[in-house]
């Protein structure tokens, strides 16, 4: 049977200061700001999308930056770490680069045969860089980062749950995942064993309920090919007993949402139409782009949003 889920589409987190958010992900991590738009549910707040050159599904980390938001707390019922994929020999480069920005970094860790480092952004969002030789994606290389060390896209994500069985059943019975392995209390689920799709479940690490605010993940979205496969997945979820939203038009993809049994918000998003529908690829992310329904309030929205500048050059 053809798989309806292809891995991770995007991950959306909450940030505080918009300019610091843009600076960290473009200047420190070297991602490209591929879209500057608004939170469709809160038009006075930006929605930033960072990824590879065109914002390919599987590379895009997005943020709702609520200026002045207090720091949240990692805990149970949350996606706690976003893992990015880098080349096998890239960790020494990234260790030195992050130290140069004054960022505290973990010792080199090993997990399922891969080496990785772990750190946090200025809001406390958990990030991992996983070195591997199986990822053929190019990534995005701004002027400041050698192309061979660029972040290629997502490697995977960590779900921190109080119990795993019901979530595992949803992943394996509905979302086309399967259990690959267990390592020291970490359970790895995959679709095709490729970077960009991997989900790890850990239990009560850290303990205590999460508090959602700056530095925490709002939701994780899974890839599906198109609106037809999305509709199939929607019906599959409903038949499984999940409460699923109607289809939401996010301009650059279509979305449905539901909460998995552990409380984490899941989304299924279509691969298209993509971020180049309202900007040329060479100029992605340079201007504020609004959905049609918000255009009558364009002047008001622009006055409410703080100015944000891009401070990177294309390599």
Image (cartoon, helix red, strand yellow):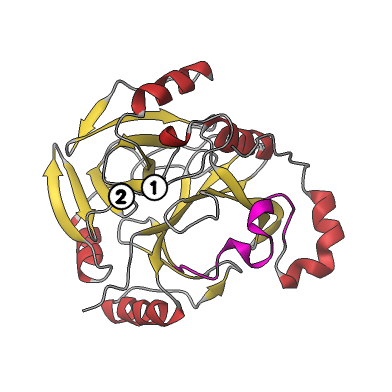
Residue 95, image x and y in percent? 40, 21
Task: Tell me which numbered mark, 2 or 1, is placed earlier along the sequence.
Answer: 1
Instruction: Answer above or below: position of 312 versus 257.
Output: above
**Residue placed at 25% from the left, 27% from the top?**
109
Residue drawn at x 46%, y 55% is: 10
Q: Nearer the viewer, residue 244 or 131?
A: 131
Which residue is under mark 1?
A: 154
Q: Residue at x 13, y 48 (%)?
A: 181
Residue 253 vertical placement versus 27 (above, below): below
Report the front residue among 4 and 122: 4
Magenta span has 237?
no
Residue at image coords 47%, 22%: 98
- List the residue tagged with mark 2: 195
| Dots 2, 1 in contact, CB < 8 A | yes
What is the C-alpha distance between the residues marked 2 and 1?
7 Å
Q: Answer whether residue 120 is visible to the viewer in this image.
A: yes
Q: Is residue 105 visible?
A: no
Q: Quadrant of residue 300?
A: bottom right
In the image, taking residue 234 as reference, residue 142 lies left or right, namely right
Name the image quarter holding the C terminus.
top right
- Magenta region, main secondary structure: loop
Q: Is residue 277 magenta?
A: yes
Q: Which residues are magenta?
A: 270-289
Local SS, label 1: strand
């Amino acid at each position: 049977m053809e798989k309806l889920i292809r891995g991770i589409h995007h991950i959306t987190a909450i940030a505080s200061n918009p300019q610091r958010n843009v600076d960290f992900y473009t200047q420190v991590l070297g991602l490209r700001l591929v879209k500057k738009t608004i939170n469709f549910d809160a038009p006075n707040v930006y929605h930033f999308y960072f990824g590879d050159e065109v914002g390919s599904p599987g590379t895009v980390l997005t943020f709702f930056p609520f200026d002045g938001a207090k720091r949240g707390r990692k805990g149970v019922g949350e996606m706690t770490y976003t893992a990015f994929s880098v080349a096998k020999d890239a960790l020494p480069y990234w260790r030195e680069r992050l130290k140069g920005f004054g960022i505290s970094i973990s010792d080199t860790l090993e997990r399922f045969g891969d080496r990785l480092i772990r750190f946090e952004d200025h809001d406390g969002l958990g990030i991992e860089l996983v070195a591997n030789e199986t990822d053929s994606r190019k990534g995005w290389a701004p002027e400041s980062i050698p192309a061979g060390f660029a972040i290629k896209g997502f490697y995977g994500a960590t779900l921190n749950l109080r119990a795993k069985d019901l979530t595992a059943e949803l992943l394996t019975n509905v979302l086309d995942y399967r259990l690959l392995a267990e390592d020291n209390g970490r359970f790895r689920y995959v679709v095709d064993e490729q970077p960009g799709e991997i989900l790890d479940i850990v239990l009560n690490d850290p303990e205590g309920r999460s508090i959602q605010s700056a530095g925490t993940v709002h939701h994780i979205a899974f890839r599906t090919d198109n609106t037809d496969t999305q509709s199939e997945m929607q019906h599959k979820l409903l038949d499984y007993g999940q409460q699923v939203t109607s289809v939401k038009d996010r301009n650059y993809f279509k979305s449905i949402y539901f909460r998995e049994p552990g409380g984490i918000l899941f989304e299924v998003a279509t691969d298209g139409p993509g971020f180049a529908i309202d900007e040329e690829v060479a100029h992605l992310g340079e201007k504020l782009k609004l959905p049609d329904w918000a255009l009558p309030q364009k002047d008001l929205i622009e006055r409410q949003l703080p100015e944000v500048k891009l401070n990177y050059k294309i390599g």
